[in-house]
């Protein structure tokens, strides 16, 4: 089934399982699935939400079970599923932890790959890239899937997505701490994401996708170099280029969708869905050409956009944007903090956003990204005890679907 622009949506949220007493990651997603389903499987359909596992044993992904037209109340569906997962985990002294990175995990000793379906693929990944680093086993994100009907719609959507990608982490950064220390990046997940496939750089590219606006060009420019580079490693041909493409937004021609991947998961679905809806409305605005023509959107080279992205992952909403041409898109003429660009966008799209989601976005504007709030809560005390205390509060926010106030 093919859909038109913004007709349906797919949302994926990833969470890690932690031991309730020790706070360490707990690789028992397979046991969770046995509790729910009676056997180990990599996917469980639970009505409108599907539970699945990818790559490591301590991460569960909750996602819309196929495309949905109703995004407004999705946060409540996700919240129900989170409660159910936590109830099943409680018997195993385990619970879900939100945010994009476990602040105390040592991936090289704690990572356990998923040992069941697709394990052959993961073992190959591990052989090529060594998946025991933060960039593989300590990164939880939200993915937004948006459909396109044909090349004409792909061109518009890809142009808009590329232009918005560099500033998205200003809203969503939630990974400031690795191994008990402030990383110097509010979005450390995206900092490690940039280089976790350095062995085969064709896979991630510059995170911001290249200037390609048709299926044929995409295959020539992105998929073919990936397939060529992976060939010597993948002698059994078990890897699919749709999965190997690791840019910050990837084209899934197998299902006619673009998947946005630069978004850190938040403290609760209420926050995730507000951000998702806000991003979608901003993409509609760009596609409408009200701010800038599609032709002008297409002129942006990935290197220019990457430069903006690369500073935004450091300071999130407080990043000063000084690229004059980028500022001009939003009617600005001088350097300004990126949160002000988001405020301008919000003023243009908020009429299309439900009141409850507007409230969450306003909360973000007033209190900062989740990373900013985590750092504020932790203060100067990076002791294990203080970090645990604050992250257990985040786990409570997830359970109760409420925003984190330091």
Image: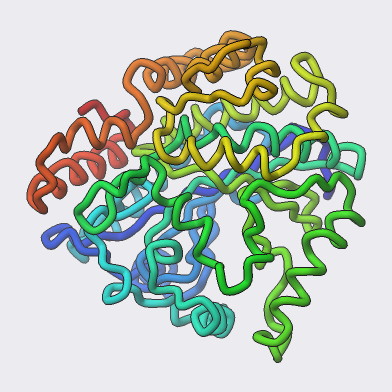
Q: Examine the rendered structure and indicate whether residue 264 appears above or below residue 366.
A: below
Q: Which quadrant of the rendered structure holds the C terminus?
A: top left
Q: Which of 75 and 280 lies nearest the eye of the viewer?
A: 280
Residue 117 seen in this snapshot? no
Residue 313, position as x, y percentages in the image: 46, 40
Residue 392 in percent (x, y) is at 18, 45
Q: Is residue 32 visible?
A: yes
Residue 403 placed where, x, y %?
Answer: 32, 28
The answer to whether 146 appears left or right of 37 in the picture is right
- Outermost residue to the bottom: 235
Q: Quadrant of residue 150?
A: top right
Q: Residue, x 69% and y 52% (percent of image)?
A: 250
Relative to 1, is 118 on the left or the right? left
State the residue at coordinates (44%, 28%). Answer: 319
Residue 105 or 305: which is nearer the viewer?
305
Q: Residue at x 78, y 60 (%)?
A: 222
| Nearer to me, 203 or 306 | 306
Q: Tell me what residue is drawn at x 56 percent, y 23 percent.
A: 322
């Amino acid at each position: 089934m093919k859909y038109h622009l913004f007709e349906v949506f797919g949302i994926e949220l990833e969470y890690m399982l932690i031991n309730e007493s020790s706070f360490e990651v707990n690789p028992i997603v397979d046991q969770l699935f046995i509790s729910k389903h009676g056997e180990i499987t990599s996917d469980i359909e639970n009505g409108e939400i599907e539970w699945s596992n990818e790559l490591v044993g301590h991460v569960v992904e909750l996602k819309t079970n196929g495309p949905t037209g109703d995004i407004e109340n999705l946060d409540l569906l996700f919240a129900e599923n989170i409660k159910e997962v936590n109830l099943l985990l409680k018997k195993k002294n385990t619970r879900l932890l939100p945010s994009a990175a476990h602040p105390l995990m040592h991936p090289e000793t704690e990572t356990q790959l998923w040992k069941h379906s697709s394990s052959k693929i993961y073992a190959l990944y591990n052989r090529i890239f060594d998946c025991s680093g933060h960039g593989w086993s300590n990164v939880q994100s939200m993915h937004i899937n948006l459909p396109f009907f044909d090349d004409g719609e792909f061109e518009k959507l890809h142009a808009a997505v590329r232009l918005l990608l560099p500033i998205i982490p200003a809203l969503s950064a939630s990974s400031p701490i690795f191994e008990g220390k402030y990383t110097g990046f509010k979005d450390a997940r995206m900092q490690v994401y940039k280089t976790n496939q350095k062995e085969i750089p064709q896979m991630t590219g510059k995170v911001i996708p290249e200037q390609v606006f048709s299926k044929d060009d995409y295959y020539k420019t992105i998929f073919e170099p990936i397939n060529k580079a992976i060939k010597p490693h993948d002698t059994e041909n078990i890897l699919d280029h749709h999965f190997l493409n690791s840019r910050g937004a990837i084209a899934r021609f197998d299902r006619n969708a673009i998947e946005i991947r630069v978004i850190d998961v938040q403290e609760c679905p209420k926050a995730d869905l507000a951000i998702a809806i806000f991003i979608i409305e901003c993409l509609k605005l760009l596609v409408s050409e009200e701010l800038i023509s599609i032709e002008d959107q297409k002129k942006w080279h990935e290197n220019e956009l990457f430069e903006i992205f690369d500073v935004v992952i450091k300071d999130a909403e407080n990043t000063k944007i000084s690229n004059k041409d980028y500022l001009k898109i939003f009617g600005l003429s001088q350097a300004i903090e990126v949160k002000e660009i988001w405020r301008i966008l919000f003023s243009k799209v908020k009429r299309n956003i439900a009141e409850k989601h507007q409230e969450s976005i306003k909360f973000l504007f007033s209190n900062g990204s989740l990373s900013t709030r985590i750092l504020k809560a932790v203060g100067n005390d990076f002791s294990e005890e203080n970090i645990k205390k604050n992250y257990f509060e985040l786990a409570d926010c997830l359970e109760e679907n409420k925003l984190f106030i330091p």
